[in-house]
């Protein structure tokens, strides 16, 4: 009887081992796992490629945004200068007539120079014996105030006297005098 139980036990063990081997092959678990493993590698590679492409596009967009922000900042400075000149009534607010020196933030234009010459309107008063010539003082004062503020702005930005003089095409002494006048007014 013990032999019968032993034989039946061994038969059950062999049968269970064979059924496990057959079950694994027939159920397809190993084949499915191989397919899933290969397809997941394929999808991982595709996802990685897409991620790299997206990352490159984001970097390009960030660079473009930075360049646009710089352009906006420059235009903002230009319009601020135009608005200040418009408020002062100097008629230097037409964009087509202005040439901006962006790094200094100073307005230079040929029309500005022409306005200085044209604003010095001379009128003759008196008789034949006495002739006196005078300038239109209100226009000259407004132009001097603007020039003084431009010089002080450049000086406060850390520019040297020589740089200011060469930029505005005036002498060093005049620059020093105008800086002193502006500091005294404050």
Image (cartoon, rainbow, N blue to C red):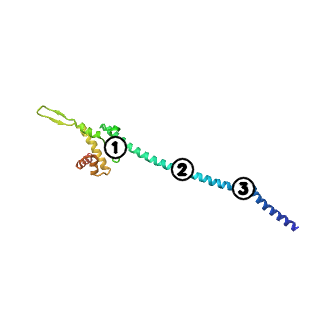
Look at the numbered discs 2 and 3 and tell me whether their residues touch, using CB distance below 8 Å. Answer: no
Say which element carries label 3.
helix
**Residue 10 screen position, x and y as percent:** 82, 65
Residue 128, disc: none
Instruction: Please tell me whether mark 2 or mark 3 is closer to you in this view.
Output: 2
Q: Is residue 138 visible?
A: no
User: Callout 2: 10 Å neighbours few (<14), some, many (20+)?
Assistant: few
User: What is the CA distance from the residue labelled 2 to the residue labelled 3?
Assistant: 36 Å
Residue 53, disc: 2
Residue sitting nearer the eye, 56 or 122: 56
**Residue 83 screen position, x and y as percent:** 35, 39
**Residue 147 screen position, x and y as percent:** 27, 43
In the image, is residue 24 above or below residue 154? below
User: What is the CA distance from the residue labelled 2 to the residue labelled 1?
Assistant: 40 Å
N-terminal of the two: label 2 or label 3? 3
Residue at 82% x, 62% y is 12
User: Callout 1: 10 Å neighbours few (<14), some, many (20+)?
Assistant: some
Q: Is residue 31 visible?
A: yes
Name the residue tied to disc 3. Answer: 29
Q: Quadrant of the N terminus?
A: bottom right
Name the residue tied to disc 1. Answer: 100
Say which element carries label 2.
helix
Residue sitting nearer the eye, 82 or 116: 116
Say which element carries label 1.
strand
N-terminal of the two: label 3 or label 1? 3
User: Callout 3: 10 Å neighbours few (<14), some, many (20+)?
Assistant: few
């Amino acid at each position: 009887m013990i032999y019968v139980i032993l034989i039946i036990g061994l038969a059950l063990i062999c049968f269970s081992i064979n059924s496990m081997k057959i079950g694994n092959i027939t159920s397809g678990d190993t084949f499915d796992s191989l397919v899933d493993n290969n397809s997941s590698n394929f999808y991982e590679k595709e996802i990685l490629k897409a991620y790299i492409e997206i990352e490159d596009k984001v970097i390009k967009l960030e660079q473009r945004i930075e360049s646009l922000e710089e352009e906006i900042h420059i235009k903002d400075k230009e319009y601020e200068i135009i608005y200040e000149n418009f408020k002062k009534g100097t008629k230097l607010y037409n964009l087509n007539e202005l040439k901006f020196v962006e790094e200094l933030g100073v307005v230079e234009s040929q029309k500005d120079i022409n306005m200085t010459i044209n604003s010095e309107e001379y009128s003759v008063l008196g008789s034949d014996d006495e002739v006196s010539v005078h300038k239109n003082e209100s226009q000259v004062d407004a132009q001097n105030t603007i020039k003084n503020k431009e010089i002080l702005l450049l000086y406060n930005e850390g520019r040297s006297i020589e740089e200011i003089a060469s930029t505005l095409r005036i002498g060093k002494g005049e620059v020093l005098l105008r800086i002193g006048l502006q500091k005294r007014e404050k």
